[in-house]
Image (cartoon, grey):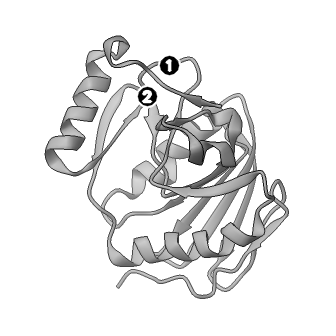
Amino acid sequence: MTLTTPEHAMSPLRKAAEAAEEATGLRAEIIRGVLMMSPTPRGKHAGIINALYDQLRPAVPDHLRPFQVASVAMPGDPDDYATPGLLVCDAGFGESDDWLADPGDVDLVVEVVSKGNSTKDTRDMVGWYADAGVPAYLLVDPRDGTWTLYTVPREGAYQGVLHGLYGETVAVPRLDVEIETGGFARYA
């Protein structure tokens, strides 16, 4: 299931986010009531997302698909939404005209730490995705060649946290998938 807010029912903040995104070409998100704008990812950032997509697409169960540039709604909040680098959710989302995925249909979100906005990815989004009930959050950090897998969201925090280094495999139990990280790029 996906979520759509009709144009006439959008809050002023949501309208401002959409207008800013259209006018600037930057990616807009509303995180805990704050409008955040992000530049287009760098080549290495995008390359990691592509590598993850290439690994996940043939590996996830048939009823699921990985999606790039798709957004996730915060349940119970008409404004808040996040746009991870990649998410894995119900395949039906790809047939929808909606742009917000229901977090209940999302099995995994992936963020690649940006060079200039690392606090958002490493701190703010961990709690946000846990609050949204997303079962697994993979954070890839090209600054130091590490990754962190957060699982089991409960009361706004992930109960399971597994840290690893590039070259180590990330096992995503909910999807029964293993992700190879050895080829991921690092920032200069």
- Percent x, y for residue 73? 52, 32
In the picture, the quarter occupied by the N terminus is top right
Residue 57 versus residue 10 in the image, above or below: below
Residue carrying label 1: 77
- Percent x, y for residue 25? 21, 51
SS type, badge 2: loop
Return the residue found at the far left: 23
SS type, badge 1: loop
- Percent x, y for residue 179? 71, 74
What separation in Å lies between label 2 and label 1 (alpha carbons)?
9 Å
Q: Amino acid at mark 1?
A: Asp
In the picture, the quarter occupied by the C terminus is bottom left
Picture quarter containing residue 180?
Answer: bottom right
**Label 1 environment density (alpha carbons within 10 Å; few <14, some 14–19, many ≥20):** few
Answer left or right for 78 relative to 103.
Answer: left
Q: Amino acid at mark 2?
A: Arg
**Residue 132 got which mark?**
none
> Can you see residue 90?
no
Picture quarter containing residue 184?
Answer: bottom right
- Percent x, y for residue 60? 76, 62
